[in-house]
Image (cartoon, helix red, strand yellow):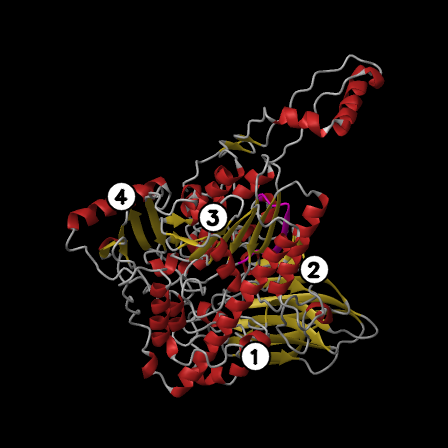
């Protein structure tokens, strides 16, 4: 009884203790081990609470005066992506915060999505996060598995355990591919990676008009709003969360990670934004590069005398293009420019919300306008459907011209020609994916913190990297780097805090060595020198040569901003030393063995990563099982398959999706249209093939079966489809071509409904596609 009384008393006194007492107790906190341990309270011997003195209340609070933190990470936007950095698109939010704060012209990323995001939030190099590539290309080797280890806890978790409210909005792309399902584990989902709140999508991209998004770990049903756009939605969610958090706990600092899917493909943007850019890129990418460089020099973003690096040989001269090519390509970049401008506007709404709640002066804002250089994955011509890139299909200019007026809208899934990517990475040669060129890694970055930074509107030239963001946040918040988080000893951060540069433009660089590696493209930066090799271009599916045969170049970045003067022959000994240094850094950071495979790494079996469906030839599902990405669904590509569905048809008749995979830009569906069963194969949104019955299903139970006999003989072949109802053949037809690699980056497999965009337009998606009867069982088999 004494123990029970003591426990109850402890609970009550903890609730009633005064803030003054709590504050005096706060000073003894050891913040190097997280979570911070509760104090050990002495057992009470007092019977009556009225005669007892309560112990100090223990409450974890952030250090006095600790700033709020906003980290903005734009997607696929290169060095010339802002007007501050000489770009052609107006970015007033970036311009304002750079003008009131600092902007850095030597800030680097890892060259692609997942690795940059993991490195930014952890302060450790991307291979130490097991993010040597994007999660969809994970392998069996440490450094490349795609599964973030517990030894590199993210700064969000450090802040949360130190008294911050934490929220992540937008793109994630850090959850291991085989863990992105209801089966979990959920350890690497955002709400187990330091965030109290998550509203966004897990994959590398999403359809902005019809995204597949989560609130925490729960899928979100899209509103029936023809004007819905995810970028608006995620901003609304961010603004509401900030206001709510400050209304309830005004003295509690927040950490917001705002990561729009923009400006990654698909380039989806409302028409009113696109109209603003009509005709403004008719000069072409060659003249645009010259214009950008002139502005960069004039504004002091790059040194006087900086030369324009040559374009890759695969990028044609603008003047050599046909009139149709110029017309199409110019409109592609008009849509992209509109997307950039809209994104900056939405970021401005978040900043305004912080200002509205009176927190802007003490909010440390990092504007990282690109997780890598601008994407050249659109290839020479750009594409109506980005899924054509991943399936090795080259779209024709004539076909794209037919849908040009729809470009950027819900009926397209577009990307732009690679020449524009090179322009938005001016003054450099290369683009996203090329970790061995500043065009692939260097982006515009600004820091704004009026209370903590005295200087205004100044340029900083110190070498910096995304791994520097996390240690900067900790130093600004007055927090030590923890040695233990959630019972796991931590790998020390590889990054260097940038606080030293805030009020000293001439401060000597503290981040002096940094390796780069992505799919075989690799480099080493050391004290101003940059040694590198170009192993493959983004549009090349195979490397140019073997890893041991790569040709290395040497640049002095202090005198050669755009990397145009190769000094490898002049300083061969120095180059050799830097190559050795690269290997030293590679060994320390789990970079070895280097994996330069591209297409093979998409295949889990070839890459050697876990696969939920490994070894399985059948999958049995039922009504209500939805949201299965391709990484957690049976792979039916390049083989024969059988789908058998048990359905119950009501007296009013059946209509809707039975089972689907993919969406408007590639996929397949077994469905019932106004009572008539059918199967559709949607080839990349370019061609559609249907096998349908002629008679309606009668009320009651039925078994619908679809057999697809694959022709064989390689990838992407066709086959014959046969439809059965209750064992009777009711339809047959040819499906002459199939997608070999991927249906969609974010569309899902669903039973009883088609989420996001429709595979079959006449059935639709979301609520209207819901099957009107019941589906007790669906079996998918491959053979």
Which one is in front in this view, the residue at disc 3 or the one at disc 2?
3
Is 535 placed above or below 409 here?
A: above
Is 17 placed above or below 124 here?
A: above
Task: Identify the disc placed on residue 635.
Answer: none
Q: Image quadrant for the N terminus?
A: top right
Task: Identify the disc placed on residue 581.
Answer: 4
Q: Which quadrant would residue 581 be assigned to in this image? A: top left
What residue is rendered at 69% in x and 42% in y?
A: 249
Q: N-terminal of the two: label 1 or label 2?
A: 2
Q: Position of residue 298 (x, y in %)?
A: 35, 65
Q: Position of residue 697 (x, y in %)?
A: 75, 76
Q: Position of residue 3 (x, y in %)?
A: 78, 17
Residue 433: tell me if it is visible: yes
- Secondary structure of the residue carrying numbered label 3: helix
Tell me how far mark 1 sits from mark 3, CA to CA. 42 Å
Q: Which quadrant would residue 24 be assigned to in this image? A: top right
- Secondary structure of the residue carrying numbered label 4: helix
Span colored in magenta: 193-203
In the displayed structure, does residue 697 sit left or right of residue 429? right
The answer to if 195 sits in the magenta stretch is yes
The residue under label 1 is 688
């Amino acid at each position: 009884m004494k123990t029970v009384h003591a426990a109850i008393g402890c609970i009550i006194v903890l609730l009633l203790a005064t803030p003054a007492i709590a504050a005096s107790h706060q000073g003894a906190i050891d913040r190097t081990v997280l979570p911070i341990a509760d104090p050990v309270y002495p057992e009470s011997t007092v019977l009556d609470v009225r005669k007892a003195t309560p112990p100090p209340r223990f409450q974890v609070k952030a250090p006095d005066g600790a700033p709020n933190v906003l980290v903005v990470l734009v997607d696929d936007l290169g060095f010339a992506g802002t007007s501050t950095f000489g770009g052609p698109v107006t970015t007033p939010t970036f311009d304002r915060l750079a003008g009131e704060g600092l902007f850095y012209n030597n800030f680097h990323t890892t060259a692609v999505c997942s690795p940059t995001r993991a490195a930014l939030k952890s302060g450790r190099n991307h291979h130490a996060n097991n993010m040597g590539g994007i999660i969809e290309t994970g392998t069996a080797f440490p450094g490349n598995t795609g599964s973030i280890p517990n030894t590199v806890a993210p700064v969000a978790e450090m802040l949360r355990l130190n008294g911050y409210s934490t929220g992540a909005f937008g793109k994630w792309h850090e959850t291991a591919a085989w863990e992105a399902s209801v089966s979990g584990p959920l350890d690497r989902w955002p709400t187990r990676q330091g965030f109290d709140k998550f509203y966004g999508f897990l994959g590398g991209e999403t359809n902005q008009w019809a995204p597949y998004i989560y609130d925490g770990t729960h899928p979100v049903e899209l509103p029936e709003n023809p004007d819905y756009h995810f970028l608006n939605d995620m901003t609304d969610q961010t603004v509401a969360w900030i206001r709510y958090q400050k209304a309830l706990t005004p003295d509690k600092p927040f950490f917001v990670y705002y990561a729009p899917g923009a400006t990654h493909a698909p380039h989806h943007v409302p028409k009113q934004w696109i109209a603003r850019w009509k005709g403004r890129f008719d000069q072409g990418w060659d003249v645009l590069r010259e214009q950008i460089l002139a502005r960069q020099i004039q504004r002091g973003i790059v040194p006087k005398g900086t030369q324009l690096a040559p374009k890759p040989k695969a990028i044609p001269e603008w003047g050599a293009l046909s009139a149709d090519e110029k017309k199409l390509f110019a409109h592609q970049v008009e849509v992209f420019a509109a997307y950039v401008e809209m994104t900056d506007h939405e970021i401005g709404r978040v900043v305004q919300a912080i200002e509205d709640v009176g927190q802007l002066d003490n909010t440390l804002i990092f504007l990282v306008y690109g997780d890598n250089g601008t994407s050249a994955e659109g290839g020479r011509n750009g594409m109506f459907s980005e899924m054509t890139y991943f399936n090795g299909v080259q779209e024709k200019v004539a076909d794209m011209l037919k849908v040009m007026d729809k470009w950027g809208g819900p009926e397209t899934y577009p990307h732009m020609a690679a020449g524009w990517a090179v322009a938005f990475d001016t003054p450099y040669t290369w683009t996203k994916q090329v970790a061995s060129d500043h065009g692939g890694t260097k982006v515009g970055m600004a820091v704004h913190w009026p209370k903590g930074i005295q200087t205004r509107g100044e340029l900083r030239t110190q070498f910096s990297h995304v791994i520097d963001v996390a240690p900067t946040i900790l130093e600004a918040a007055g927090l030590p780097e923890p040695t233990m988080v959630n019972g796991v000893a931590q790998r020390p951060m590889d990054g260097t805090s940038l606080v030293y540069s805030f009020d000293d433009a001439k401060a000597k660089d503290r981040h002096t060595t940094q390796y780069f590696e992505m799919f075989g493209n690799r480099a080493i930066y050391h004290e101003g020198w940059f040694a590198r090799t170009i192993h493959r271009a983004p549009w090349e599916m195979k490397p140019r040569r073997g890893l041991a045969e790569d040709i290395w170049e040497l640049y002095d970045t202090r005198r050669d901003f755009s990397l145009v003067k190769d000094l490898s022959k002049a300083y061969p000994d120095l180059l050799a030393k830097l190559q050795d240094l690269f290997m030293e850094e590679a060994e320390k950071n789990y970079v070895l063995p280097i994996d330069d495979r591209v297409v093979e790494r998409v295949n889990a079996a070839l890459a050697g990563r876990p696969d939920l469906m490994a070894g399985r030839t059948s999958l049995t599902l039922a009504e209500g099982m939805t949201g299965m990405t391709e990484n957690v669904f049976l792979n039916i590509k390049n083989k024969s398959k059988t789908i058998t569905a048990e359905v119950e048809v009501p007296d009013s008749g059946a209509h809707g999706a039975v089972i689907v995979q993919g969406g408007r830009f590639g996929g397949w569906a077994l469905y019932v249209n106004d009572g008539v069963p059918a199967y559709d194969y949607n080839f990349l949104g370019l061609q559609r093939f249907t096998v349908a019955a002629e008679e309606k299903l009668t009320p009651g139970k039925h078994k619908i079966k679809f057999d697809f006999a694959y022709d064989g003989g390689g990838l992407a072949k066709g086959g014959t489809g046969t439809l059965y109802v209750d064992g009777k053949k009711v339809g047959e037809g040819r499906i002459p071509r199939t997608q070999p690699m991927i249906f969609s980056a974010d569309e899902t497999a669903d039973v009883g409904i088609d989420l996001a965009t429709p595979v079959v337009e006449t059935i639709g998606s979301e609520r209207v596609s819901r099957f009107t009867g019941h589906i007790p069982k669906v079996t998918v088999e491959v053979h």
